[in-house]
Structure formats: structure tokens, C-alpha cells
Image: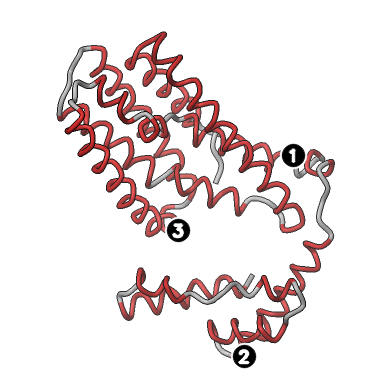
């Protein structure tokens, strides 16, 4: 919609002029779609006028109302599997599942086991967990600044390839019993790679690839697949780690990342 493009341009202009992007996010107005969908047109108009002025508000409100009418004719579950709809649904589900099965979340959920296998005492493990959380936050902010500049596909494929390389090196380190700073550096690199690519971009793509009429239902299915995949990842990690060790576990995740990084395996 023109409203979306205008709002983004307005936000970038304000941010560049004042250099206060993070502060201004605290004062972002409510979504105008919510009151428009419930017939509160005057409230939606005031929100839009605050964003882009009264002239833009009328046109944007008309576009939103047209979209709301389309959404009211929402598709049922059966229509999600018809020709023309099933492909984006499959892409959304696959991307959601891969975001979890690339394995990075085991570092967050089983940080103690990961760093213990690398030879760190408890005191050092706590510090390393703080470091990984900080890196995750920092590179998520990097992703916010680069997702529109580089594009979804490049970030997704680059993230998958980067994780595959890092996992191969990390598995080799565990296999050769190389502990200490080298292992932590690889773990931090994996988190940074994930945080600026697969972690945020997957959510962006899932929200963008579906037509308005089926978006609510399709996104719900994709997100459900994501959390089911997350559950499977967490449940199977200890079993996988017990059978093939830390090295084999990370090599397994490397294979999954390579599979996702093949041409045509990702879309965006």
C-alpha cells in the first residue's frame, strides 16, 4: 500500500534528521488497521494524520478499508492447499522449520551443556552466556538496518552458508578437543550470523509472502510449524548429543544448513 511505503519513508526521514531511531520507537502511534477493522474510522484517521498529515490520511484510510473488506472474505483451511496458495504456504512452513532446525537455539537452551563440553567451569559459563545474549541483541539491531538494503534472499542464504561453515569448524574443534577462547569465538560467530539473518528475516518473510485474504490463517500455520520444530529440536538435542557427541551434533546442523543454502531452497 502507498500508506506503508509513505510511513516507512517518513520514519527514515525523521530518523536520519534527528538520529534518534531507538528513542522514537517508544512513541510509535497505534496501528490504524485495528480501529479501521472495527469501524472506528475517525480514530484511524487521527492516527494516520499523525503519521503523514491529513491529506495522506484520507487516501491511506480508503486503502486500509479496502484491505479490511478483502480480509473479511478470509480463506478457510481447504483453500490454503489449492493451486497458487499451497506453494507460498509450503515456503513459509519450510522457512519456519529451518529457522529452528539450523540448531542455534540449542546454544541458548543448553548453554551449560555446550560450554561444559568445551571445558569451561561454571563461573566462565555464566559470563559466556551473558556474552552470547549481548551479541544476539547487537546483531539483531544490525539485521533491522540491513534487511531492506540487502534483501531477504541474500540474508537468508548468507546466514545458512555462514552457519554451515561455523558449525563445521565448531564440530572440528569439539572433535579435536580444542577448548577455550576458540570455541567461544565460534559460538559467538554462529549467534551473530543467526541474529542478523535467519532469526529476524524468517519472521519478515512469513509476514510478507501471503496474500491478504489468507494471511491470518497461513501465518498461524507457519508459526505453529516453527514452534513445533523448536520443540522437536530441544527434545532431540540431548539424545543426539548423547549418541554422536557435540562434534557430530554440530556437523548434523551443518548438513541441515547446507541443505537450506542450496540454490532454490530459499525464497525471499
Q: Quadrant of residue 82?
A: top right
Report the side of 150 relative to 4 (left or right): left
Element at badge 3?
A: helix
Q: Residue at x 67, y 71 (%)?
A: 34
Residue 200 in percent (x, y) is at 46, 49
Alpha carbon of mark 2 to alpha carbon of mark 3: how far?
27 Å
Most extreme residue toward the left, as rendered?
181
Mark 3 crowd level (few <14, some 14–19, many ≥20, 10 Å Cα): few
Element at badge 2?
A: helix
Q: Reply above or below: 124 against 207.
A: above
Alpha carbon of mark 2 to alpha carbon of mark 1: how far?
39 Å
Q: Nearer the viewer, residue 231 or 100?
A: 231
Tell me the quadrant of the picture where the N terminus can be found: bottom right
Q: Which residue is mark 2?
A: 55
Please say if the residues under marks 1 and 3 sit with CB atoms less than 8 Å apart: no
Element at badge 1?
A: helix
Mark 2 or mark 3: whose residue is earlier in sequence: 2
Mark 2 or mark 1: whose residue is earlier in sequence: 2
Residue 209 in percent (x, y) is at 63, 50
Report the side of 49 relative to 135 (left or right): right
Residue 141 in percent (x, y) is at 35, 56
Colour scheme employed for the rendering of this structure: secondary structure
Residue 112 in percent (x, y) is at 30, 28
Alpha carbon of mark 1 to alpha carbon of mark 3: how far?
26 Å
Please say if the residues under marks 2 and 3 sit with CB atoms less than 8 Å apart: no
Residue 86 badge: 1
Most extreme residue toward the top, as rendered?
243
Q: Reply above or below: 83 against 116.
A: below
Residue 148 badge: 3
Q: Residue at x 33, y 39 (%)?
A: 191
Amino acid at each position: 500500500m502507498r500508506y506503508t511505503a509513505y510511513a516507512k519513508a517518513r520514519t527514515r526521514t525523521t530518523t536520519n534528521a534527528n538520529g534518534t531511531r531507538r528513542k522514537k520507537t517508544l512513541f510509535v502511534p497505534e496501528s490504524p488497521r485495528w480501529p479501521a477493522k472495527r469501524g472506528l474510522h475517525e480514530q484511524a484517521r487521527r492516527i494516520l494524520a499523525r503519521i503523514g498529515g491529513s491529506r495522506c490520511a484520507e487516501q491511506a484510510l480508503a486503502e486500509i478499508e479496502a484491505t479490511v473488506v478483502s480480509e473479511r472474505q478470509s480463506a478457510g483451511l481447504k483453500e490454503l492447499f489449492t493451486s497458487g496458495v499451497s506453494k507460498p504456504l509450503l515456503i513459509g512452513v519450510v522457512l519456519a522449520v529451518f529457522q529452528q532446525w539450523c540448531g542455534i537455539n540449542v546454544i541458548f537452551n543448553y548453554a551449560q551443556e555446550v560450554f561444559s563440553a568445551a571445558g569451561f567451569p561454571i563461573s566462565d559459563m555464566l559470563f559466556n552466556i551473558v556474552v552470547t545474549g549481548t551479541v544476539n541483541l547487537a546483531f539483531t539491531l544490525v539485521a533491522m538496518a540491513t534487511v531492506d538494503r540487502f534483501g531477504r534472499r541474500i540474508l537468508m542464504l548468507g546466514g545458512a552458508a555462514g552457519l554451515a561453515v561455523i558449525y563445521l569448524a565448531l564440530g572440528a574443534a569439539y572433535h579435536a578437543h580444542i577448548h577455550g577462547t576458540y570455541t567461544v569465538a565460534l559460538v559467538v560467530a554462529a549467534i551473530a550470523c543467526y541474529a542478523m539473518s535467519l532469526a529476524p528475516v524468517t519472521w519478515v518473510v512469513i509476514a510478507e509472502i501471503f496474500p491478504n485474504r489468507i494471511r491470518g490463517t497461513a501465518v498461524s500455520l507457519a508459526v505453529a510449524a516453527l514452534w513445533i520444530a523448536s520443540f522437536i529440536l530441544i527434545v532431540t538435542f540431548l539424545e543426539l548429543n548423547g549418541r554422536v557427541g557435540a562434534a557430530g551434533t554440530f556437523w548434523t546442523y551443518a548438513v541441515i544448513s547446507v541443505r537450506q543454502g542450496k540454490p532454490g531452497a530459499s525464497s525471499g
